[in-house]
Amino acid sequence: MSRGVIAAFEGAPVFHFTDTINLPWILASGELRPTWNSDTAIGRTHFLWGTTNPDGDLTSGPQIRIHGSTEREWRAGAFHLVRFTLAAYEFSTWNEIVQASNWTPEEVAALIEDDKRRYGRSGHKRWRLRHDPIPLSRVLKVETTSFEDAETEKWWPLEIRPRRRGVLLRPNDPKRKGVKIGHRRFYSVPVNQEHHCYEPWLPPGERRSRYLYETYEDALADARYAALNGEDDDEYN
């Protein structure tokens, strides 16, 4: 890679990716926060991660989930991806972090090789990191996409400023929060201090009825998820 291309990466906007599973809790906190990660060759880290690649990085948490444990929910439209755009100066480059760390060259090389083995490619030259939280007031832009939108590479603007009070749902509820995007509502519940999980529209085993859902769109999305997983859902036929 030429020095000119590297310089262009270093001055490019930084994209932080999340999803509507975590977005309610981000909005409630008012900031993007670093998270702990211990599943790496460089040991336990605590960073806010980003990339200069607007398509994202396969090593990021949301990408790992939609290609792994929550792929069926992603394809069924149970949650959306969310992309934050931030200024380049808010972050350090991967090389700057490596130089300032106590990681050995062998540990860094092992991390990169492991990512290549697990994800097929490594975009570490475009990784950006930060130790401290970033207030949402310094976010330049927020966008969202669904599985169907992502297939056509469409990202839609999402306004999260206080004047749009309807975006964050249940702001004071410590056990369940959600966001409203268009006519859809997306909820999640905490697993632990840093991790959350998608919450189906009704508890498992409870009889589904479109009249019990908060919106008709939610009922249709749940029916689509059931159909995708081969479940009987005659109630909607």
Image (spheres, rainbow, N blue to C red):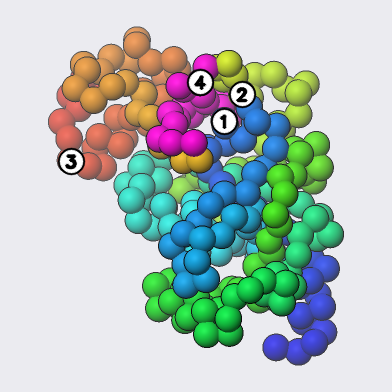
Magenta span contains residue 12? no
First in sequence: mark 3 or mark 1?
1
The CA span between labels 2 and 3 is: 32 Å
The CA span between labels 3 and 1 is: 30 Å
**Depth order, front residue of 127/111:** 111
Residue 137 position (above or below residue 212)? below
Question: Residue at label 3?
Answer: 230
- Looking at the image, residue 40 sits to the left or right of residue 235; the answer is right
Magenta stretch, residue numbers: 173-193
The reply to whether dot 1 and dot 2 touch (C-beta < 8 Å) is: yes
What residue is drawn where x is 75% and y is 38%?
Answer: 136
- Looking at the image, residue 143 sits to the left or right of residue 161; the answer is left
Q: What residue type is labelled 4?
A: Pro
Q: Can residue 154 be seen in this view?
A: no
Quadrant in which the C terminus appears: top left
Camera-near label (4 vs 1) is 4
